[in-house]
Image (cartoon, grey):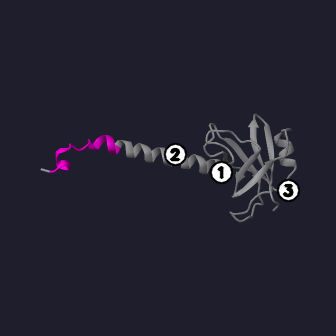
């Protein structure tokens, strides 16, 4: 009998559990880093100085917020709800953009608005131009 045959094998369940747990932790860390890079915020965080929408980045125009009347008066096109920002925000804030009614689905607005409170909207301008 050889020396290797005499040693008992380690239990399989703890080894598999450790491997699965390690894989889950690496995947979660990778997702978190990707999310931070893509949206400029951590998962669960509200919109900050930058917003990522329509594969473009938008910069905060400043501290003053605007009312819905001010937002809709600044645009020739209707301002409409285009989704939540950020996607994993708790709770997400509503994102609005003025988009030409006959625009292609890939068309992006040059200014977007994030609802910051009841009747208050923060504007974000497109970085890098149209």
Report whether 20 appears left or right of 110.
left
Residue 28 inside the magenta-drawn segment = no
Contact between marks 3 and 1 (CB within 8 A): the answer is no
Quadrant of image for the C terminus: bottom right
Report whether 66 appears left or right of 54.
right
* Residue drawn 33% across the image and 45% down it: 16
Tell me which segment is drawn in magenta. Answer: 2-16
**SS class, disc 3:** loop
Q: Residues within 10 Å of mark 3 (few under 14, many from 20)?
A: few
| Image location (x, y in percent) of residue 118 | 76, 34
The numbered disc on residue 28 is 2
The residue that disc 3 covers is 76
| Image location (x, y in percent) of residue 97 | 76, 52
Nearer to us of marks 3 and 2 is 2
**SS class, disc 2:** helix
| Image location (x, y in percent) of residue 17 | 35, 42
Closer to the camera in the image, 88 or 72: 88
């Amino acid at each position: 009998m050889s020396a290797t045959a005499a040693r008992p094998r380690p239990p399989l369940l703890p080894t598999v559990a450790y491997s699965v747990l390690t894989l889950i932790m690496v995947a979660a860390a990778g997702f978190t880093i990707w999310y931070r890079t893509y949206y400029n915020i951590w998962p669960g965080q509200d919109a900050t100085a930058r917003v990522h929408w329509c594969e473009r980045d938008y910069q905060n125009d400043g501290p003053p917020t605007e009312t819905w009347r001010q937002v809709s008066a600044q645009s020739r096109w209707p301002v409409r709800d285009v989704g939540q920002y950020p996607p994993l925000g708790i709770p997400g804030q509503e994102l609005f953009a003025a988009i030409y009614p006959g625009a292609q689905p890939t068309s992006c607005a040059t200014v977007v608005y994030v609802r910051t409170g009841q009747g208050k909207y923060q504007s974000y301008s497109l970085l890098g131009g149209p």
